[in-house]
Image (cartoon, grey):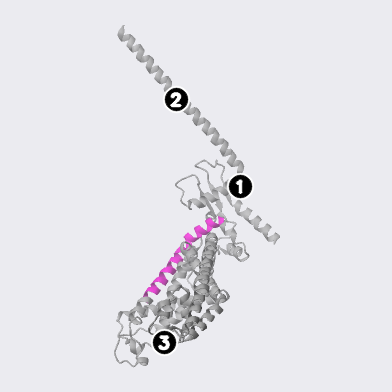
Amino acid sequence: MELRLVQNVHFIQTLDNAIRLNQHDIGDVDCQIKIDFRILVPTVGNQETSLLTNFIEVGHKEVLEHPLCETFLLLKWRKIRHFFFFSLLYQTVFVKLFSFYIQGVYLKDCPSARRFNSKKTCLADDIYMDIGYCLIGLNVLLMFKELFQILHSWKTYILEWENYLQWGIIISVFCCVQPMYQMNIREYVFTWQHHVAAASVFLAWVELMMIVARFPTFGVYVQMFTTVSINFFKFMCAYLCLIIAFTLCFGVIFANYPAFKQLQFAFIKVIIMMSGELEYEDVFYSDKYEIKYPYTAHIAYLVFVILVTIVLSNLMVGMAVNDIQGLQKSANLDRLVRLVRLMAHLESMLFSNLLKWVPLKVLVFLHSSALLLKSQRDFTLNIRPNDPRENKIPKNFIENAFRLAVAKNPHQSKSSSKTGNSKKKLRNMEQIEQELTAEMTRIIKHKLEKVKLELRDN
């Protein structure tokens, strides 16, 4: 453990040495910061995020917050973000078309004639046939993309839960999209396809949300949602026995009440009651349903309100708030970790051996579009911290790099301070000289006016 800590400190110092100031004073406009990326990417034309990925895997992800790493990831993201914009555009078009198809075919009140024995026709518009063919084509491309990822690295593929979500969408779309001319929905759409369509369109929009989460701006919010959701299910598993207890209790007491007649639906009713939807008056003062065990029913309801609606629900809200506060504290580091993993995944795909059949020009174009450091001159970035026109990187990145470089060269800071004092003294002397000159000029003018007046009098 101590050896790893020493190695980490040594590498941090190496990263610090990659940010240097030139020989100008730190207050001078010509002062430059030189940021050298060679420590992060030793060679040209290869995967550029492999070293940062290794730091994440060995548990030193805090290295990503170093000014050198943050600057590199910012420039790298600017280079490859068009790949993610294309992915977002593709998924958006797919989800929109699928939603239109669901609206035109499944949102109509046209149950299957095989189940309800209805002879009325219910035709879908012809435009949904064209939309259906487009959906199948887009879905085939998605399937090929997933198959490519499996062949590239199936061990990594099976560990990502989002891949299973993608396969669920692909299979369900094939099951519920069947374009045909003048399609009679009652005749050709089965009852089970309505169930599949409902689940499929839900999963498609969830997948679109996960793609939006890949962008640094929105990633932290989606991560908050997923973290709180996972902790909620853990929370529910911990108190599942209490929920089942109240389900059985209410099932016995309110046996004649419709919501509690079937046990599986009574469980859902109890979970809904957790949100505060108690329906006290409808249950206890209804003319339709008689309360057969009034005293026990009131006691059970009161205990449920105290233990579940008040205590359990507020505990759940407190845990969610605590999770969000923790994520906000580590939001920047989590964002950088997600960014490195996305970049590493994209690079591994583009440099895959499975792409050998792709024409060389296309492959070179893809590599050049993804690589930030294409030649030796790209390995360094020169910025002027005192120049207000500097816009290569954001101001806060410049400030962090400048602060690090100054802290590493304190003698240059002192020299700059002395130079600044000398310049201040020089400016004071120039100001005094200007004031003296102005005063002498005023005195001379006054003397000349006196001489002119005396000459006129004579």
From the viewer's side, name the closer residue of 111 and 343: 111
| Residue at (61, 63) in percent of width and height | 55
> Mark 1 = which residue?
408
Nearest to the eye among marks 1 and 2: give it: 2
Numbered disc 3: secondary structure: helix
Asked whether residue 291 is in view, the answer is yes
Mark 1: which amino acid?
A: Lys
In space, the residues marked 1 and 3 are separated at their CA atoms by 68 Å
Instruction: Tell me where the magenta segment starts and ends, as one range.
Output: 68-97
From the viewer's side, name the closer residue of 96 and 321: 321
| Residue at (51, 42) in percent of width and height | 30
450 falls in the magenta region: no
Mark 2: which amino acid?
A: Glu
Are the two marked residues, 1 and 3, in contact with CB atoms closer than 8 angstroms? Answer: no
Q: The C terminus is located in which quarter?
A: top left
Nearest to the eye among marks 1 and 3: give it: 3
How far from the left and from the top, in percent, is residue 38? 58, 56
Numbered disc 2: secondary structure: helix
Are the two marked residues, 1 and 2, in contact with CB atoms closer than 8 angstroms? Answer: no
Classify 10 Å Cα crowding around label 1: few (below 14), some (14-19), many (20 and above). some
Location of residue 335 with respect to 458 vertically, above or below:
below
87 falls in the magenta region: yes
Q: The N terminus is located in which quarter?
A: bottom right
> Mark 2 = which residue?
435
Numbered disc 1: secondary structure: helix
Q: Which mark is residue 150?
A: none
How far from the left and from the top, in percent, is residue 341? 54, 66
In space, the residues marked 3 and 2 are separated at their CA atoms by 95 Å
Classify 10 Å Cα crowding around label 3: few (below 14), some (14-19), many (20 and above). few
In space, the residues marked 1 and 2 are separated at their CA atoms by 42 Å
From the viewer's side, name the closer residue of 367 and 383: 383
> Mark 3 = which residue?
192
